[in-house]
Amino acid sequence: MLLGCLGAGIGLIATEWFSLQALGTPNPWFIAPMGASAVLLFAVPASPLAQPWSILGGNTVSAVIGVSCAALIGHTGLAAGVAGALAISAMFALRCLHPPGGAVAVTAVLGGTAVAQLGYHFVLWPVAVNSGLMLLTALLFNQLAGRRYPHQPAARPHHTRDPLPSRRLGFTHDDLTQALASQGELMDISPDDLEQILARAQQLAARRLQGEVLCRDIMSRDVVSIGPQDSVDEAWTRLAHHRIKALPVVHADGSLAGILSLHDFFIGHSAPDPRRPPVMTHARRVEDIMTRQVRTARPRQSVADLVGLFSDGGLHHMPVVDESQRVVGMITQSDVVAALFRGAAHG
């Protein structure tokens, strides 16, 4: 919440300055639409109404309609009403609905002499420029704050059209789309976001009904590991001997340094070239090829928290670490499947 307030303040200060340069004097009729845009872009950046095309397209097309109505309709009140109605219709048609756009259209009619003198220049300066500046501020601020913006559904790990494994039973994406359409009114949530929320609710319900199974209950405790200074050949030998597909890489004190899986042994595994097969790496030490950014679990963490990561996130192995980041276990997809089966059998 505080981040949203800070971002909105920064965005509004910038847009007010540009408005002042364009209009010559402070103009509250213009600042009001930008304030509403700031609420959406910084407070609810996941909203379909706050996405880049919504603010750019919505504000710009509304400004065009507002200026046109002001020029063609002599009665100010009538022009404002027609401008608002046409702006909403245009935003629906262009799939760029942005509530402040309605205020922009009315501003073009009621904004006074300064706006009237600008004519269609009002569309570019200050509306389009200020909308672009607000959007740029939102892009930078939300990225720095660790929030995903523009908001898009998570990428499918295998790049196919199949639903994620956790979504292949029960309701489908098409079911949600049809249900939202049957409401007969616009819902301020995308089908993808609603699908994620409902899937999470199902996981929480399953945990409540089946009882809590913790990572410490199913993890492997006799962990086969490797050190960052060990040779790549030694790591390959351990994988083959134990018939496993990943090794946690640990420092001398047992703390996690990374993870080494089979694909790490191949050159260019992070960006494979489809025109030629991968070749084995010539690196000598484990630290030269290991993956350093590792998803981990805690011993007292619920297994239900990991289901989505293994079923939909493309993970196959996950180290379990304690408060000191020392590796105390490993969990694999087969461990999670076995836990879910036992839960279903006893349910």
Image (cartoon, rainbow, N blue to C red):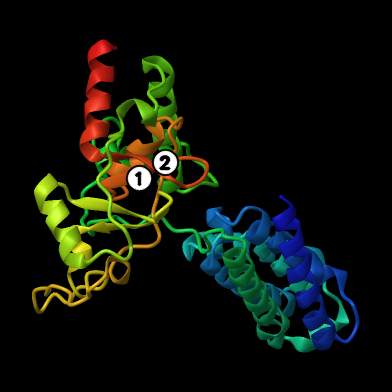
The local secondary structure at tag 1 comes to strand
Mark 2, Cα crowd under 10 Å, few <14 / some 14-19 / many 20+, is many
Instruction: Give the residue type at disc 1.
Output: Pro
Q: Position of residue 70 (x, y in %)?
A: 74, 75
Sequence order check: which comes first, mark 2 or mark 1?
A: 2
Quick check: 304 left or right of 187?
left
Q: Position of residue 257 (x, y in %)?
A: 40, 58
Front one among 347 and 336? 336
Residue 72 makes an appearance in the image: no
Mark 1, Cα crowd under 10 Å, few <14 / some 14-19 / many 20+, is many
Picture disc at residue 247? none
Q: CA distance from mark 2 to mark 1?
A: 6 Å
Check disc 2 and report the residue beneath it: 297
Q: Is residue 167 above or below residue 161?
A: above
Q: Position of residue 343 (x, y in %)?
A: 28, 18
Residue visible at 34% across and 40% down?
308
Check disc 1 and report the residue beneath it: 319
Front one among 124 and 111? 124
Quadrant of the rendered structure where residue 166 is? top left
Residue visible at 40% across and 60% down?
293
The local secondary structure at tag 2 comes to loop
Q: Residue furthest right?
A: 25
Q: Position of residue 335 (x, y in %)?
A: 24, 33
Q: Is residue 314 above or below residue 57?
A: above
Quadrant of the rendered structure where residue 80 is? bottom right
Residue visible at 30% across and 34% down?
221
Front one among 311 and 163? 311
Instruction: Give the residue type at disc 2.
Output: Ala
Front one among 19 and 151? 151
Q: Are marks 2 and 1 in contact (CB under 8 Å)?
A: yes
